[in-house]
Image (cartoon, helix red, strand yellow):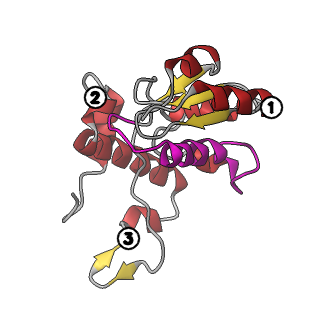
């Protein structure tokens, strides 16, 4: 079943939603953190969700300003995809999260495609597992270097597709300064 264009055009024309109006579609460019940042920096946007086979092509061609795909798979409808886009964008809007730096020190942060370093909280020892000593040291510069080394290590192990080429001299030095601890994966 394909959604007919008449009610979609009528709804968009009656409401005049914020632009750009983006159709969630498997054939659109893949949504990523860079696109989330772009949408968060604008004055607003709207999402159009199809159902089953999607919408009449004239909707995509003449009603929408573009398309977005949330991944290489097919959903029965775009509602879950819309929630994903809204969540990713909203947390980048100034004032939504309490600490503006939070969105910069995480996976896919601005400037470099790295996964985020491991996170720990109290207690320092849970069962027989300890928080890494460097995080308890109070040496903020050393903690920052450890975080960078762990982000590099985690990205290389879990998502090598995010980085191309060999490690830089500095990256190699960092990984040597902080070798994996016993039991690290």
Give the image quarter of residue 73.
Answer: top left
Q: Is residue 114 left or right of residue 85?
A: left
Label 2 close to label 1 by CB (< 8 Å): no
**Quadrant, the C terminus:** bottom left
Instruction: Give the answer, above or below, for where 157 lies relative to 133.
Output: above
Q: Position of residue 156 (x, y in %)?
A: 26, 39
Residue 38 at x, y percent in the picture:
63, 28
- Is residue 76 visible in the rendered image? The answer is yes
| Cα distance between the residues tagged 2 and 3 | 27 Å
Could you give the CA–CA distance between mark 3 and mark 1, rounded to whole angstroms? 56 Å
CA separation, marks 2 and 1?
54 Å
Which region shows up in magenta? Answer: 71-100
Asked if residue 22 is among those painted magenta in the image, a careful observer would answer: no
The structure residue drawn at horizontal position 72% and vertical position 29%, both measured from the top left corner, is 10
Q: Which mark is residue 167?
A: 2
Residue 126, located in which quarter of the rendered image? bottom left
Q: Quadrant of the N terminus?
A: top left
Residue at the spot 42% in from the left edge and 77% down from the top edge: 124
- Residue that badge 3 annotates: 131
Query: Badge 3: how crowded within 10 Å, few (<14), some, or many (20+)?
Result: some
Query: Any mark on residue 14, and which?
Result: 1
The first of marks 2 and 3 along the sequence is: 3
Q: Considering the numbered disc 3 on the image, is that residue within a helix, a strand or a loop? A: loop
């Amino acid at each position: 079943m394909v959604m007919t264009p008449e009610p979609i055009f009528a709804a968009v024309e009656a409401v005049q939603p914020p632009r750009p109006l983006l159709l969630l579609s498997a054939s659109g460019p893949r949504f990523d953190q860079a696109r989330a940042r772009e949408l968060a920096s604008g004055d607003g946007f709207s999402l159009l969700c199809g159902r089953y086979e999607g919408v009449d092509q004239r909707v995509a061609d003449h009603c929408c300003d573009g398309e977005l795909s949330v991944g290489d798979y097919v959903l029965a409808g775009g509602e879950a995809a819309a929630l994903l886009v809204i969540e990713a964008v909203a947390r980048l809007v100034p004032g939504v999260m309490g600490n503006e730096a939070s969105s910069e020190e995480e996976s896919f942060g601005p400037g470099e495609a790295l996964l985020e370093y491991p996170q720990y909280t109290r207690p320092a020892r849970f069962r027989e597992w300890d928080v890494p000593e460097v995080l308890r040291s109070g040496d903020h510069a050393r903690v920052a270097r450890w975080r960078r080394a762990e982000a590099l290590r985690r990205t290389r192990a879990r998502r090598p597709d995010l980085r191309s080429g060999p490690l830089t001299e500095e990256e190699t030095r960092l990984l040597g300064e902080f070798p994996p601890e016993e039991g690290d994966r």
